Image (cartoon, rainbow, N blue to C red):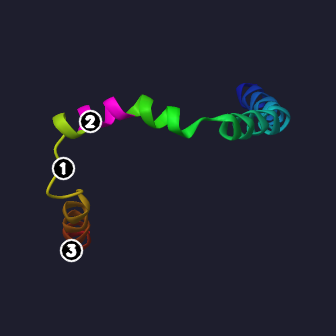
Amino acid sequence: MGADLDRQQLREYVQLWAVNGPLLEELRDREIRQADTAVSIRMFESAFRIALRDLPPRESSGLVEWQDFVCRWRRHG
């Protein structure tokens, strides 16, 4: 009985997104078209400056460490 309920809930969820997805996309597109880029830049400028001050650039993005991990995993796997 539980699996039937889960499937029904999933169907309802998919149907809800099928109906509301296009409406949400339309809203998003309209908000993007109406956005004032200059105002947005000014709003985020202080946050950006604080991030630059408090979070200096790292020497690595972590990609090198990830690649090393994967190579070690392959050798042992």
Residue at the disc numbered 1? 57
**Mark 3–mark 2 CB contact (< 8 Å):** no
Q: CA distance from mark 1 to mark 2?
A: 13 Å
Residue 11 in magenta? Answer: no
Which residues make up the magenta segment?
45-51
Label annotation for residue 75: 3
- Residue 52, how many percent across, how many down? 22, 40
Amino acid type at mark 3 = Arg
**Mark 1–mark 3 CB contact (< 8 Å):** no
Which residue is at the front of the view, 11 or 17?
17
Query: What secondary structure characterizes most of the magenta part?
Result: helix
- Residue 2, how many percent across, how many down? 71, 25
**In the shown orientation, is residue 15 left or right of residue 42?**
right
Residue extending farthest to the front is 38
Q: Earlier in the sequence, mark 3 or mark 2?
A: 2
Amino acid type at mark 1 = Pro
